[in-house]
Image: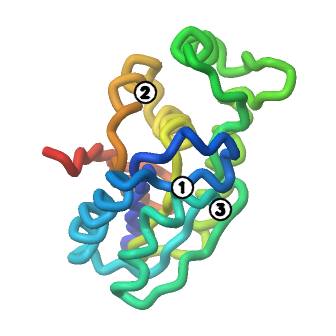
Amino acid sequence: MSNITTVYFIRHAESDFNVLDDRSRPLTIKGTADCSLVTDFLQSKKIDVIYSSPYRRSVDTISGFAESIVLPIHTIEDFRECKRALLDDWQPYAEMQWADFSYKRSNDESLAEVQERNVAALNEVLRQHVNRNIVIGTHGLALSTIINYYDNSFVFNDFKDMVFINPWVVKMTFNHFECVAIEKINLFL
């Protein structure tokens, strides 16, 4: 018997960086409008369960879809974004982190730490929902570390290419805990 589980990771829509608090940062007007792309994309996917990072922008990106199919959004703290201070010039720091997954400043998280907690949370979701179609609301860096875990050819340049694609979808197919396919979907194309 096949044990195929499909996970649609939804990287949140455009968020308002005028709000510095990572947890409560809302979507911009454009981001809110772009959530309809997510709802339209997911409508035909026969979703069984919906999870999200507890951060407002992730929940808000998938809430219209959840309401349309009358399913609750279950938040999981470990799906949150990487803990790090906002930087005006983020790229050099991000490059250092991608070059060395253990690299971090004193109050930040390393990419290894982000990857470990996100993959552990994903494995628990996979354990609970075999043969289901799952949505997980997430973040760009967190999602990138998940992709990298299953495909180590996904590196800094791939992360940099998707940084400004909000929302962004990654479909992963699993046989038990083994990722057998990864599809990156740009809803704007």
In three-dimensional space, the C-alpha distance between marks 2 and 1, rounded to whole angstroms, equals 22 Å
In the rendering, which numbered label is found on residue 54?
Answer: 3
| SS state under label 3 | loop
Occupied quadrant, residue 7? bottom left
Question: Which quarter of the image is occupied by the C terminus?
Answer: top left
Q: Please say if 187 is above or below 160.
A: below
Report the residue at 66% width, 46% height from top.
Answer: 22
Image side of residue 56 versus residue 103, left or right: left
Report the quarter where the N terminus lies: bottom left
Residue at mark 1 to residue at mark 3: CA–CA distance? 12 Å
Q: What residue type is labelled 3?
A: Pro
The residue that disc 2 covers is 159
Q: Picture quarter containing residue 164?
A: top left
Which residue corresponds to mark 1? Answer: 26
Q: Nearer the viewer, mark 2 or mark 1?
A: 1
Residue type of the residue flagged with mark 2: Phe
Residue 39's place in the image compared with 85, above or below, is: below
Q: Give whichever of discs 2 and 3 has the lower sequence position.
A: 3
Q: Which mark is residue 112?
A: none
Q: Residue 90, located in which quarter of the rendered image?
A: top right
Image: 68 above or below 135: below
Q: Measuring 49% from the left and 36% from the top, which residue is drawn there?
A: 144
Residue 57, percent from left and from top: 53, 56
Q: Position of residue 142 (x, y in %)?
A: 57, 41
